[in-house]
Image (cartoon, coloured by chain):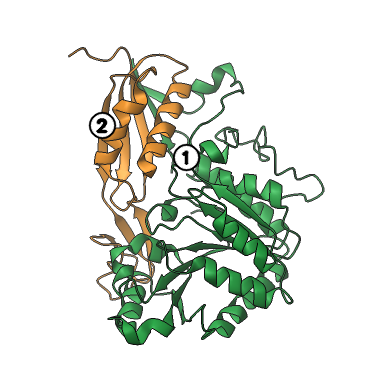
Chain colours: A orange, B green
Amino acid sequence: MHELALVQSVVEMVTEHAQGCRVRRVKLEIGKFTCVMPDAIRFCFDVVAAGTPLEGACLEIVEIEAWARCRVCGETFVQETLWTGCRCGTQDCERISGDELRIREYELGAAAAF
Amino acid sequence: MCETCGCSDGAAVKVVNLKTAKPRDPPSEHPLGDTHYHAYHIHDAANSHLYDHGHNHDDDHIHDHHRHSHASTVLIERDVLAKNASLAARNRAWFTGREILVLNLVSGPGAGKTTLLERTVRELRHKQTFFVIEGDQATSNDGLRIKAAGAPVVQINTGSGCHLDAAMVARGLAELKPSFGSVLMIENVGNLVCPALFDLGESAKVAILSVTEGDDKPVKYPHMFQAASLLLINKMDLLPYVEFDLDRCQSYARQVNPSIDMMTLSATTGEGLETWFDWISAASRRERGVTFPQPAEAAP
């Protein structure tokens, strides 16, 4: 399951960037067409973060809509499926968003106690 | 585009000086001096998800490209796959510099990748120099078959990993040392989902689908078929015995990827193999006809 490897990357990247400071929240942006399951990411996060400065941190996932720009008529539109074409009839489109797998931000501080 | 400084996401393709290229060692800094590039160590393929952080960062690294929206929130906008993309770009530059055609063979388990590769190596090795990287979770079974067929091969075992990544391929290259103008075949782990996410630096992905798998595979696994340049429909000798609508499968493939090329063949009987061999030869000639990468168009 590659979500595990991706979450390990997230925890390592944030730990490194925060230079070991405690992190209480991480916000990820995941595009609609990115081949990851947010539920699998959440499942892995608590396990992977244990014993690291991210232990107990809240994981926020923002899903990014898939937008494309038509190379023929220039219109931008939302893609419902990977192969949704432009209203003008062409499928020759450039994806603008929807493939993201990005750490947007993180918040320093001790995790909230339950 | 990064909101913080305006740079573009993703790793840049670089021109590699072949006299000084050292593919075993990750570069300590990006050749263009890009402060957004971070050196990572190539990880051990047997422990495919462990990373070595033996290197130090500059003290001001944390302040390079983030801003605080309030006192404790740090905006970093970091692509999780940046490391793989960066290594893939480096692999790609290395291949282009050596004029090597690199094909990433992807499919579900059992579609016939290894049998097709065995036959391709055996029958085409008098015309092409082949090198092979085999990817599986465990065993060297496929690697040994390719070795018997007559090509130098490295077997990568991913352990629990479900796909090859750029770092594993870089490690394989250090062992394999493919020669100038050769053809490198990378047989990925049998999986129609995850390999689509991990760029290896290949020239093209070639998807293999067998008639025993169902004609709607292209729409069920659209990411992979959208990423592939060529679709090989294999095991055509079994077509009379299965419920597989060839026209419908090809139509689904075109729906997901209008520019995909398609071929039908049988690695067992030899049907259609000459067309596949001609495709490889033409693609390799194109690689060898390009000495330097073409500059990308300037961003508006």
Closer to the camera, B56 or B161?
B161
Residue B6: give its label.
1
Q: Quadrant of residue B182?
A: bottom right
Q: Going by the image, does B284 lie left or right of B116?
A: right
x then y, percent, for residue B83: 52, 39
User: Marks 1 and 2, Cα distance to the nearest angstrom?
Assistant: 25 Å
Residue A60: give its label.
2
Residue lying at 28% horizontally and 19% vertically, measured from the top left: A56
User: Vertically, is B19 above or below A109?
Assistant: below
User: In this view of the protein, can residue B23 be seen by the observer?
Assistant: yes
Find the residue positioned furthest to the left: A114
Instruction: Describe the element under mark 2 as helix, strand or loop.
Output: strand
x then y, percent, for residue B231: 45, 73
Residue lying at 36% horizontally and 44% vertically, measured from the top left: A1
Q: Identify the image quadrant of the N terminus of chain B.
A: top left
Q: Chain of mark 2?
A: A
Instruction: Describe the element under mark 1 as helix, strand or loop.
Output: loop
